[in-house]
Amino acid sequence: MKITGIEKAGGDRYTVYVDGEYWWILDLEIILQNSLKPGKEVGEQELEHLRYQAQRRTARERAYYLLGYRDHSKKELYDKLCKNADPAVALEICELMESQNLLDDEEYAGKLARYYLQSKKWGGRKTLYEILRRGVDRETAEAAVEACGLDYPAQILELIRQKYSAYLEPGDYKGKQKVIAALSRKGYEYGDIKQAIAAYQSEDYEDDWE
């Protein structure tokens, strides 16, 4: 097999033709490092190595870009890299990012747990689901949620005071059901919701007697 053409594709990238047909797009650095030029004889093994170099370089730069934009789980990054690179290359780059401390599922899960539990005021169930959806394994996700040590009934009680007190008038059964449904959608457990509502209504009752 022979390289029959090298044409500029944009920037520092060049389209390489082998035996008169499109073969791959390579960065100028790879072309120079491997002394590629029209007329050079190349074997299948050499072409595979060049393709690997190109994929690795592209995947590495994409990983830096993605991680510079926001944190990712290892699975999230791997899945995105696999769209344009072989799975083995994607895995290698993920491990490279881990070695450079740019990819850490435990730290990522902790950030997500704190954000959803403390900032967005979600319950543990919905928070856990979201962390799992991001590709973090269950053990790591559960540990991150647990590490926040959130007092769910207390947080629910605060939410009731801020947003739902108007629905909890004495005898308003439908209003109470709306509050329970809303808090359930936020991922709180029924037992914690019931406890918080009881605490709120107890406070309200005490206020009436003051």
Image: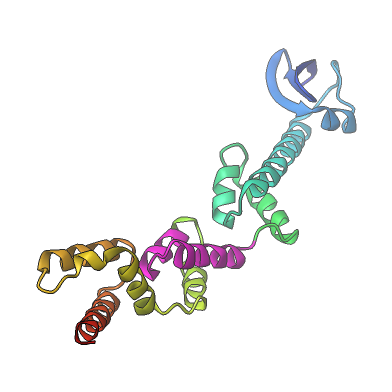
Q: Is residue 106 visible?
A: yes
Looking at the image, residue 191 sits to the left or right of residue 143; the answer is left
Q: Which residues are magenta?
A: 104-132
Res 156 quadrant in image? bottom left
- For this orientation, the residue located farthest to the front is 210
- How many marks can you see? 0
Q: Position of residue 53 (x, y in %)?
A: 76, 38
Looking at the image, residue 31 sits to the left or right of residue 90; the answer is right
Residue 54 or residue 128, whichever sits in front: 128
The answer to if 34 sits in the magenta stretch is: no
**Residue 50 in the image: above or below residue 120:** above
* Residue visible at 48% across and 79% down in the picture: 149
Residue 75 or residue 152, whichever sits in front: 152
Looking at the image, residue 183 sits to the left or right of residue 108; the answer is left
Looking at the image, residue 59 sits to the left or right of residue 7; the answer is left
* Residue visible at 25% across and 68% down in the picture: 165
